[in-house]
Amino acid sequence: MVLLKTLIFFLLSICLSFLGSSSPHQQIRILSAERRIDLTSPIVRVFLTLKVENNGESDASEVLLAFPPSEAEHIATLKASAPEGKRKKKVYVPLSVNPAELPDTPNGVKLFSVSLHNPLKSGEKAVLEVLYVLTHSLEPFPAEISQSEPQYVYYRDSAILLSPYHVTEQITYIKTPSNKVESYTRVDPTHRAGLEIKYGHYHDRTPYSFSPIIVHFENNNPFAVVEELVRVVEISHWGSLQITEHYKLKHAGARHKGVFSRLEYQARPSISGSSSFKHLLARLPPRVHSVYYRDEIGNVSTSHLRTDSQKSELEIEPRYPLFGGWKATFLIGYGLPLQDFLFESFEGKRYLNFSFGCPLLETVVDKLIIKASCATGRVKEISCYCSFSSRATP
């Protein structure tokens, strides 16, 4: 299976390079591109800085971003901004990002359009800052490990930025959680120092150039995936908001094989079960009250709540540690003052402004269902079947 995926990856690169070399002249040229890929957690974060120039005769109102289809299906967040000002006065202006299409896009490449704040005139330059987050992009290998074995994963990407434009100069930095790197693809010039692998500088790459790389490294961070989250929001006319969240949680890392020994786990916690996890942190709104944590058996006492005027943090611990492939179901409930979330519009109507995201930090949510009810008995249900990362939900 690994060899098949690698072969497909290399065939994709050949097709992209061939088709890209015959692409017509582009209005936009990328003068420099810098990528910083953070692999220190199961959620991959990529920070991309582009310096672009308009070589055409007419104004340019957008810049296109390109992703291979295998990567595009794992995009959880995609944001872009334009820095304005210098040093302490620098501000970042958010830019709109939307899916786009071109008639000559090769091999299923997915495009996204970044709308510029001000049209770029002929000969003008601009800098774009892009952040995109990938989920389910790290593949455990080996797929099964024993209790005492560390967890290694594959990460696949391209040493060269996939782009519909000519790229004059580019560099890529990949940061791993530790210096325990089993192997990595070399595309000269390639240099590794400490936790970082550097690819480049590369010069004068044609549109849709692609050079596949694989990094095989140790990553023992919790692969916490919420397969389903049902969030029930109850609105009371007596001034309170009651939240109940039902979780189906899974450790999506390398599957556990063999017999679990709790004695060994407690005697050598830093070695035995290093890729397992038993703590989760939930970021809740401030002024939370009446917090409880339960599973199928009943109340779970292993939770700690810390509150201040800005936020509330709930640390929970399941009844047993979670290894790869293991699951747990539980619910969290809490109350909030209604006046913190209920507002009145100019038309005199009241509306509830409440975040729909998952409060668990560093957690991927595959399926989210929200139910809202009020004292009148009317119920609305909103279902979201998507994959996204949740860091901090205010």
Image (cartoon, grey):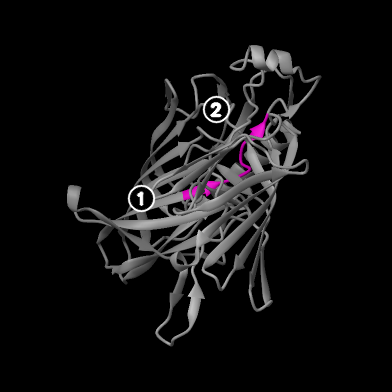
- Whether the magenta-drawn stretch holds residue 144 is answered as no
Dot 2 corresponds to which residue?
A: 185
Amino acid at pointer 2: Thr
Reply above or below: 347 against 337.
below
Which residue does the image show at 53% across and 19% down from the upper left? 180
Q: Is residue 62 visible?
A: yes
Q: Quadrant of residue 145?
A: top right
First reached walking from the N terminus: tag 2 or tag 1: 1
Give the magenta part as a residue range: 132-140
Q: Which residue is mark 1?
A: 50
Instruction: Indicate left or right for 131 with 100 as reference.
Output: left
Q: Nearer the viewer, residue 318 or 137?
A: 318
Nearer to the camera, 366 or 20: 366
* C-alpha separation, residue under disc 2 versus residue under disc 1: 24 Å
Q: Secondary structure at mark 2?
A: loop
Q: Position of residue 204 (x, y in %)?
A: 38, 44
The quadrant in which the N terminus is found is top right
Of residues 250 and 58, the one drawn nearer to the viewer in this rendering? 250
